[in-house]
């Protein structure tokens, strides 16, 4: 389905990770790199240079990486190096540039440079400005070698204004094709599968829309709480943390039109197009069709204000100004500490009686697609019973923890933007979210409470 460019992964590549001593490096980036390494999916010559404040030597850093695994693999560790630096100090970037040049000299060519910003977004402007002013953001070779790319993580801004500011800054230094904005939900196998399921099975695609679909529910229920992320989470809240990105991306995949071709450009364009049809919620919509909650005990978490009104749960209704979807309510609901982990999209079909069908695309607890249907109970009478067709995508033990980051890293290296978010999508998503956040701040929908582990928000 996807058109991959070939050959590129052969070019030597240096990945510079900013904020290398943080959580993301430990939990996602390094394990993903290890799997890519094991499967021989990294460029033949590849290096990771960590850049952070902490005073570490190359050896200390390698030991830190080794500590993330049960078994030491020397060839993998040899990929890592460390450059101490302060994000605000230009001279440290000059040192970094010299280090990269040294590696290039050893390799005898201008290598690709991938800058991964695994830091809180407040630090982006400083890092980007320094990358620019020291020339690091400029490719060193001709068009066939030595590209530079930058990966940024969510949250991309905290509202439309800050997202635009960040985008302007990025675009001063990089072209859109060089910017890779991560939303790891796009790399979830079941969500990628939506496009195959919809566009390669006419059986479904022709009933996909307001004529037959009554409503859609998109759920991201987590059994875990905010845990040790209080400092980050309290300034963000559930709607910005997962609503502005993961849930709206699920909405986009399930409602977008068929792209003319399955190329990264066309797929991204269709996602952005449908997101830009989101009806901007009015005050009345916010009052009537949004809810928010906070679980008891949230305020006691380290980093959370003792009088915090940050939501850890929300439900919002979206409508699309699109001929295919006009009038179909799409409910997005998510929360922490809800007692179970359910991630799914439920499509409810119309029926003039109570015999309705629904189709559920589920990522958790298992990757399945199920269809509820009615059948006759065996016997003399015409009694009906509800049955379920179930498709299991794969065995649960085949899924590995870092699958999404493996895809994202290797796609970025091989120049495939399909699973990355465009600035148009980001903008459209904030246009929908901003009024809700503002409405909540004005008290249009009260903050309710719920017990940790319960789904009862009241
Ligand atoms: C992250 C959010 O983007 O997504 C977390 O910051 C959330 O709060 C996580 O827990 C959910 O992702 P996944 O892949 O575990 O469903």
Image: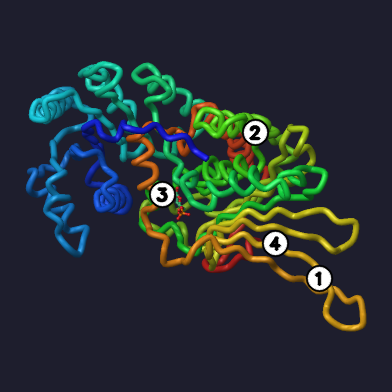
Q: Is residue 393 above or below residue 320?
A: below
Circle 4 residues within 10 Å: few <14, some 14–19, many ≥20: some
What residue sits 43% from the left and 23% below the top? 176
Q: Earlier in the sequence, mark 4 or mark 3?
A: 4
Element assignment for label 1: strand
Percent coordinates x, y for residue 54 in the rendering: 15, 42
Q: Single out the mark in the foreground, 1 or 2.
A: 1
User: In the rendered image, which residue does mark 3 sit on?
Assistant: 404
**Which of these two is toward me, 359 or 128?**
359
Element assignment for label 4: strand
Residues under labels 3 and 2: Cα distance? 24 Å
Circle 3 residues within 10 Å: few <14, some 14–19, many ≥20: some
Residues under labels 4 and 2: Cα distance? 25 Å
Q: Quadrant of the C terminus?
A: bottom right
Indicate yes or no: mark 3 CB to ligand 1 under 8 Å. yes
Q: Is the C-beta separation of discs 4 and 2 under 8 Å?
A: no
Circle 2 residues within 10 Å: few <14, some 14–19, many ≥20: many
Q: Identify the mark at residue 281; answer none if there is no mark.
A: none
Percent coordinates x, y for residue 279 in the rendering: 70, 33
Residues under labels 4 and 3: Cα distance? 26 Å
User: In the rendered image, which residue does mark 2 sit on?
Assistant: 274
Element assignment for label 2: helix
User: In the rendered image, which residue does mark 4 sit on?
Assistant: 371
């Amino acid at each position: 389905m996807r058109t991959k460019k070939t050959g590129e992964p052969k070019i030597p590549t240096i990945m510079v990770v900013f904020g290398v001593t943080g959580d993301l490096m430990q939990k996602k980036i390094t394990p993903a790199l290890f799997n890519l390494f094991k499967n021989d999916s990294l460029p033949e010559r590849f290096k990771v240079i960590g850049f952070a404040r902490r005073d570490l030597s190359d050896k200390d850093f390698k030991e830190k990486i080794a500590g993330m695994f049960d078994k030491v693999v020397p060839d993998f560790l040899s990929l890592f190096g460390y450059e101490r630096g302060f994000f605000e100090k230009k001279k440290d970037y000059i040192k970094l540039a010299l280090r990269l040049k040294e590696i290039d000299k050893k390799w005898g060519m201008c290598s690709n440079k991938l800058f991964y910003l695994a830091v809180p977004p407040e630090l982006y402007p400083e890092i980007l400005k320094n990358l620019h002013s020291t020339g690091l953001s400029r490719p060193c070779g001709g068009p066939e070698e030595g590209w530079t790319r930058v990966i940024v993580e969510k949250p991309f801004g905290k509202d439309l204004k800050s997202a635009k500011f960040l985008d302007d800054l990025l675009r001063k230094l990089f072209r859109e094709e060089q910017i890779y904005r991560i939303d790891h939900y796009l790399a979830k196998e079941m969500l990628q599968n939506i496009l195959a399921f919809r566009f390669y099975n006419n059986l479904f695609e022709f009933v996909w829309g307001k004529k037959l679909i009554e409503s859609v529910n998109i759920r991201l229920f987590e059994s875990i709480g905010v845990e040790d992320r209080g400092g980050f989470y309290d300034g963000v809240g559930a709607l910005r943390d997962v609503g502005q990105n993961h849930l709206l991306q699920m909405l986009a995949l399930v409602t977008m039109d068929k792209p003319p071709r399955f190329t990264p450009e066309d797929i991204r364009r269709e996602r952005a197009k449908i997101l830009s049809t989101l009806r901007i919620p009015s005050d009345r919509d916010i009052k009537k069709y949004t809810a928010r909650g906070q679980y008891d005990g949230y305020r006691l978490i380290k980093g959370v204000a003792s009088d915090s009104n940050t939501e850890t749960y929300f439900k919002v209704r979206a409508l699309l100004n699109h001929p295919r979807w006009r009038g179909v309510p799409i409910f997005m609901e998510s929360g922490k500490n809800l007692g179970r982990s359910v991630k799914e999209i439920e499509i409810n079909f119309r029926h003039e009686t109570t015999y309705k069908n629904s189709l559920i695309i589920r990522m958790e607890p298992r990757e399945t697609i199920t269809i509820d249907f009615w059948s006759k109970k065996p016997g003399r009478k015409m009694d009906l019973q509800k049955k379920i067709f179930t498709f299991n995508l794969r065995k649960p033990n085949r899924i590995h923890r870092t699958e999404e980051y493996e895809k994202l890293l290797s796609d970025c290296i091989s120049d495939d933007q399909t699973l990355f978010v465009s600035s148009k999508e980001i903008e459209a998503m904030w246009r929908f979210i901003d009024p809700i956040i503002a409405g909540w701040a004005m008290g249009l929908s009260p903050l309710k409470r719920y017990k940790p582990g319960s789904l009862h928000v009241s």
